[in-house]
Amino acid sequence: MTRGRINSFQSLGTVDGPGVRFVVFLQGCDLRCGCCHNPDTWDLSGGKEFSPEEVLDRILRCRSYFGEKGGVTLSGGEPLCQPEFCGELFRLCRREGINTCLDTSGYPLTAPVEAVLELTDRVLLDVKYSSESACREYVGCSLKRATDFLTRLSAKNIPTTLRRVIIPTLNDTKEDTLWLKELALGSKNVDGIELLPFRKICKAKYDNLGLEFPFEHLPTPPAEKMAELKALLSPEF
């Protein structure tokens, strides 16, 4: 029987996909992003085990709140570290007519991952930086991990929202944002871009785990800066 390790649930999420959503934060991530808000999800052996059916039972209790646009979002961590579980849970959701959304930084396109995409209604794809060097230094992987994944999403015509946390001095220039816009315009399936301000409310998690927060010294971008960058996305996004 397929079982997954889960860090936590959010029953009425409003920022992880369209509408009101039941968000499942899966355990495990192979990346080490300097801005990560959930370091407690890194360890694949952490969290608690559930079967897809047990999670579906929790989802169905909240179904009346979903409305026409809501549904289920798998987040993390990196949910695709557990592709078999994701695929089985999404299969059950599809059987119930529940919208499925995947929040990911991209992942190698193995057969189990491809199977998840066959059952995915929308993807929230984090494209954290615009250069190979920044991705290598601050994420721990190649930029191609995200862009190759986006190419596959485009080929499968899966509706996709690109996301980026804006981090002062690292990815907050006009050029960075225009690069992201051009990436979106070159992908027929991208219908939105979300720019999110870097915040440090996760610092307590690092402290509790005895870990250093790599970006503790960086500030939150001012509202004026966020507005300036978001204006560059108009009128297309």
Image (cartoon, helix red, strand yellow):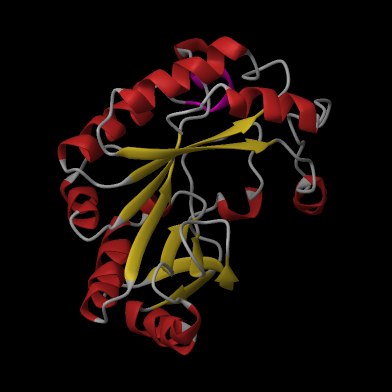
- Depth check: give the residue in front, 192 or 77: 192
Q: Where is residue 114 drawn, in percent x and y? A: 19, 49
- Is 208 drawn above or below residue 215 in the view shown? below
- Is residue 138 shown in magenta? yes
The dominant secondary structure in magenta is: helix
- Residue visible at 54% across and 52% down in the picture: 43
User: Left of 225 or right of it: where is 92?
Assistant: left
Q: Quadrant of residue 82?
A: bottom left
Residue 68 visible from this viewpoint: yes
Q: Where is residue 10 drawn, in percent x and y? A: 58, 70
- Number of callouts: 0
- Residue visible at 57% across and 56% down in the picture: 15
Extent of the magenta region: 135-140
Residue that protrudes farthest toward the front in the picture:
235
Residue 221 visible from this viewpoint: no
- Residue visible at 77% across and 36% down in the picture: 212
- Dividing the image into 4 quarters, which one contains the N terminus? bottom left
- Is 73 drawn above or below residue 190 in the view shown? below
- Depth check: give the residue in front, 101 or 133: 101
- Residue visible at 52% across and 22% down in the picture: 129
- Depth check: give the residue in front, 229 or 21: 229
Q: Quadrant of residue 211?
A: top right
Q: Where is residue 70 drawn, in percent x and y? A: 43, 69
